[in-house]
Amino acid sequence: MPNKVAAFITLVVIIAVNLAVGILPHIDNFAHIGGFLSGFLLGFVFLIRPQFGWFGQGYAPLGYIPPSAKSKFKTYQCALWIISLVLLIAGFTIGTILLLRGVDANEHCSWCHYLSCVPTAKWSCKTEPAYCLSTQIGNQLNLTCSSNGKSSVYLLPGATDSQIQGLCTDLCR
C-alpha cells in the first residue's frame, strides 16, 4: 500500500458503515461482527507475508551456497497463523453447534439485542408476531392488542383471518 494511513481510514469507515447499517431493524449485526472477525482471522491465515530478503534456491546464482537455511517467515507470523487457525476452527465449530441446537445468545446477554437493533421513534425492534383478541358482532370487529393493550373497533363485515392479522399488526405497532 503506498499510503497506509489512507488505507486504514478507508477500512475504519467501511467497518463503521457496516455496523451502522446493522442497527436498522431486521438486519443482523451479529452476522456483520462475525464476518469481520472471520475475515480478520482469515487474513492472518491466508495472507501471511514473507520477508522480501528471502529468495528460493531456484533463483540463486550458479554456485551460490546459502550460509544457512533460514525460514521465510518470522516467529511471530507463524504464531499468529497457528492462533488464528485454531480460533477459526474453534469458532466455526462452536457456532455451528450452537446454531444447530437453537441457542439464543440474547437470553444470556441483557444488552446484546442492541447490537442488532436500536429502537427509535421511527421503528420498533420487537420481532414477535402481533396477537389480538377479536370479536365480531355483525359488521363490527373489535380488536385488542395483547402486547400493548390498545383496542379499536372496525366496521368490517365478514372479516377474513388475513384482514384481521393485518389490522392486528397495525394496532400493535
Image: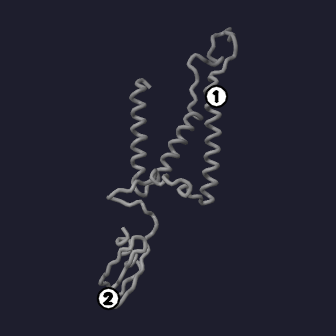
Q: Is residue 8 above or below residue 135?
A: above
Residue shown at 35% from the left, 90% from the top: 137
Badge 1 marks a residue whose secondary structure is: helix
Q: Is residue 84 above or below residue 111?
A: above
**Residue 139 locus on image (x, y percent):** 32, 88
Relative placement, left or right, of 155 versus 59 is left
Relative placement, left or right, of 103 versus 32 is right
Looking at the figure, which quarter contains the C terminus? bottom left
**Residue 74 locus on image (x, y percent):** 62, 22
- Amino acid bearing label 1: Cys
> Residue most toward the left?
155
**Residue 153 locus on image (x, y percent):** 31, 81
What residue would you read off at disc 2? Answer: 139
> Residue most toward the top?
63
The answer to which of 123 and 41 lies nearer the viewer is 123
> First in sequence: mark 1 or mark 2?
1
Q: Give residue 78's mark.
A: 1
Relative placement, left or right, of 101 versus 125 is right
- Amino acid bearing label 2: Asn
Residue shown at 61% from the left, 47% from the top: 92
Residue shown at 53% from the left, 40% from the top: 39
Q: Nearer the viewer, mark 1 or mark 2?
A: 2
Task: Examine the rendering and report whether any part of residue 153 can be seen.
Answer: yes
